[in-house]
Image (cartoon, rainbow, N blue to C red):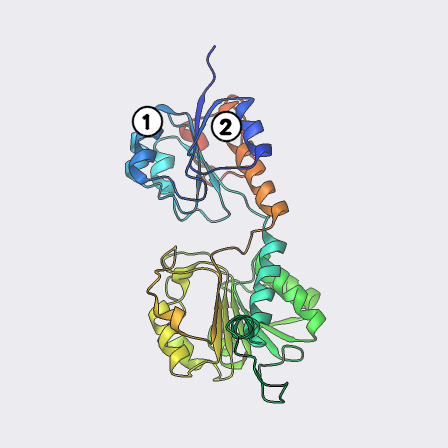
Amino acid sequence: MSKPKVYVTRQLFDEALGILERHAEVEVFDGVDNPAPRDLILSKVREVDGLLCLLTDKIDSEVIEAGRNLKVISNYAVGFNNIDVEAATRHGIYVTNTPGILTETTADCAWALLLAIARRIAEADRSIRAGKWVHAWGPRMFLGSDVHGKTLGIVGLGRIGSAVAKRAKGFDMNVIYYDVRRREDLEEKLGITFKSLEEVLSEADFVTVHVPLTKGTYHMIGRRELSMMKKSAYLINTSRGPVIDEAELYSALKEGVIAGAALDVFEQEPLDPNSPLLELENVVLTPHIASASVETRTKMAVVAATNLVSVLRGEEPPNLVNPEVKKIRPLRSQ
């Protein structure tokens, strides 16, 4: 009996490939860190039983309808806004993700960005490398902002937002948060206070965003919201780029509406090399690396492979996004 076929849109870690290869014929796009072209994905998906893709791959209804034998789409990410889940469900295709794995690593990165923008770390590094440190130390050099004792505003108190709040204790910060659902169970445990979005924006010295990208969160931080923030405040985003209106953020940074921003995600990725954000010194930019530790990225790949193989074996995957698909295409184990 021939093995099922799997296509992987990006180079993975050996641990994950080993899991796939034990159960399927596996083909991996050889573009290293470049995404697989859309026409290639459309071609490959016609003949495979499983697709392991990344958040940067747009798996829309056209791709899904092309997958005549497709049984499972395993997303190497927590979010799955790149996949038309409704279309996949209609076609009896299981969709999986990798939740919970990158929580602590992403929270670490959010804090790294917060500290970097507050203390002007990247700006100071660029200055030294450019040979601009030509005078002795002075009391007004690269003045930034203290972090300890300040107010941290968290927008979105999911796993990552909660992990960020936990870290704030070590900096003796006052933590306030906004979420569509109040988390009274965490308020006492984490020592945090629920506020409206407007209150969080207007009271916080640092605002860090941790929400999924939905119709309701698209551009939830725009001109109006930025104008509510303190002129001395900083904005940090490690969630999804389109949550913030990038054009309005640029204007706010240039005009001094807020003091600075640190961004790991952008409305368009990769960031346009002509983006006006690159002109500004009061912004720290990183290329979507919040989960980029060896340990976390490897575990994500292993979980994505395990999810995919589970469906091919007729077993319910550990991380199923669309449980309603089981009514359309029951697995052997059900």
**Residue located beneath label 1 in the image:** 46
Q: In x, y percent, where is residue 120?
A: 55, 75
Is disc 1 surrounded by few (<14), some (14 to 19) or many (20+) residues within 10 Å?
some
Task: Tell me the residue at 35%/31% (across/down).
Answer: 91
* Mark 1, secondary structure of its residue: helix
Q: In x, y percent, where is residue 238?
A: 50, 61
Q: Which mark is residue 311?
A: 2
Q: In x, y percent, where is residue 193?
A: 61, 73
Q: Give the amino acid type for the residue marked by disc 2 in the picture.
A: Val
Q: Can residue 217 be seen in this snapshot?
A: no
- Asked where in the image residue 8 lies, by quadrant, the reply is top left
Seen from the viewer's position, the closer of residues 162 and 241 is 241
Q: CA distance from mark 1 to mark 2?
A: 18 Å
Q: In x, y percent, where is residue 150?
A: 62, 80
Q: Is 86 on the left or on the right of 72, as rendered?
A: left
Q: Can residue 85 be seen in this snapshot?
A: yes
